Amino acid sequence: MSGHFRSIPVQVSQEFPQLPQFSGFMKPCRFEGEIHNLEVHGSIPADIDGTFYRVMPDPHFPPTVENDPWFNGDGNVSAFNIKAGRVHFKQRYVRTEKFLREKEAQRALLGKYRNKYTDAVEFKVRSTANTNVFYFNGKLLACKEDSPPYAMNPETLETVGLWDFDGQLPSVTFSAHPKIDPITKELISFGYEAKGDGTPDICYYTVSPDGIFTEVVWMTAPVLAMIHDFAVTQNYVIFPLIPQTCDVNRMKQGGEHWRWDPEIPFYIGVLPRRGAKGSDIKWFRAPNAFPGHTSNAYETPDGDILFELPISDKNVFFWWPDAQGNAPDPHQITSNLAQFIINPNSEDMKLSPTYVLKEDVEFPRVDDRVSMSKHRDVFCLLMDPALGTDFPSIAPVMGGGYPPYNSVAHYNSLTGECVKYFAGKTHLMQEPVFIPRAGGSEGDGWILLLVNNYGQMASELHLVDTRDFSKAQAIISLPVRLRAGLHGNWVDGQDLQLIEN
């Protein structure tokens, strides 16, 4: 072994660290297999036909870094196929380079989160493929934003391999949150640190429905910061920079990839979607804040851009503090749904948010059919203490994942009405997906999501009709417990063109 890579002893203990991110409900699952005809309480409408794909970080070996962030685990993809009122479940790990080499070594080899200088061996591609999974052009793509995606067979979940779009991918990174234009069916995506760790380069690209790259634009970020999600309108792309900044010298000394910087503004980049050059991007500035996942963006009749997402005035990733070691109390972190009105032709780069839903929310979704155009309905996770979650009872078994959310909210942006689905005092929610009702208007359909039942230490799928948020239409019991996931998507059966390897 040479270079910066360090020797580590063969691990004798197979025990995961006794820390919250590896304990209780967050104990690694490590299940692969399939189970047909899951138990259904209630009824699933016959016209729901498709597959809910989601991915969770799920380490298959105890980590080399004891206090590893919970989202540094191996990507384990779940598929819930729903047809004729029945649910079939399948789960498989993404066969990344990391997964295969660790399986051969029978121990963990990866070091700190996004710090190759702490690895035991050199990886060509370091990805865990654990952040999002989505379907495009016949392939299921498992993504993590520090690398290209891995392609999987959407029917079998077998890994096809690292996917560079037949050699067209211009950057070494690919967003975990690509967007599909509901009208043109184009894939719109980007990579940040696009020339490798510690580079300020951003590469934006558009891919035609048949997989051909049509737009490629290289840009330079004003600060070397995280860009986890972005938004797209008919004519623009919007890049929100999280004030977590990278320093390669810090990494080489064994430090973290990211460090919170409370002194820099919240930058929002706006680039024309078509025919642009890198110099065309404008970097607007808002007060320092942590942007969450975007719900949507669209253009108003007078040519402005409305950009909507939850933001927090605190460092949501509190485990990466600032240079002085300051970090907020996680119990005091909240994010509220905010909107920015941006004039793309303005020479005034200052922006201020308007808060439209002053409740603690995250993981917003809109009806994909109205994505990139004006929307009315937003579905998101919400924490409402007044609903009566029994935290004294469930806290000992919760483990440590993302902040707890005890309900799913349906927010109507026209009326301001916000209705909530609450599953019970010992239940917390994972990211929802929206399933449209055939022939229905915007927001008419169902919400499907995984729910953590801490009373039974079990995972459940809850199906909620958007016409009645007072109860679940169906609760599907899982015989395995699935730890917190990150992201997933619903793929309608008619869009799922199954392929064979």
Image: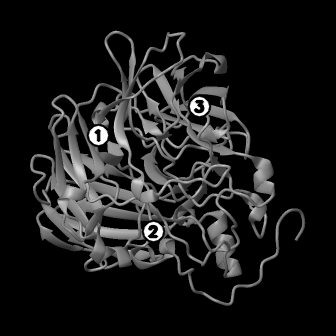
For mark 2, give the secondary structure: loop
Comparing 78 with 57, the one in front is 57
Q: How many marks?
A: 3
What amino acid does circle 3 point to? Tyr
> Residue 204's mark?
3
Residue type (three-letter) at the residue carrying disc 2: Gly
Pick whichever, 193 or 142, lies toward us: 193
Residue 103 on image: x %, y %: 64, 77
The answer to the question of whether label 1 and label 2 lie on touching residues, with beta carbons closer than 8 A, is: no
Give the distance between the C-alpha atoms of the residues marked 1 and 3, in whole angstroms.
33 Å
Q: Is residue 299 visible?
A: yes
Q: Label 3: how many residues lie within 10 Å, few (<14), some (14-19) or many (20+)? A: many
Q: Residue at x 29, y 31 (%)?
A: 370
- Name the residue rendered at 64%, 38% in the picture: 168
Whether 445 is drawn above or below 89: the answer is: above
Q: CA distance from mark 1 to mark 2?
A: 25 Å
- Label annotation for residue 400: 2
Amino acid type at image mark 1: Lys
Compared with 50, 350 (above or below) is above
Q: Quadrant of the N terminus?
A: bottom right
Q: How is the image coloured?
A: one colour
Q: Quadrant of residue 183?
A: top left
Q: Residues within 10 Å of mark 1 (few under 14, many from 20)?
A: few
Side of 244 relative to 457 (left or right):
right
Decide: is 226 above or below 101.
above
Q: Earlier in the sequence, mark 1 or mark 3?
A: 3
Say the numbered circle drawn on residue 358. 1
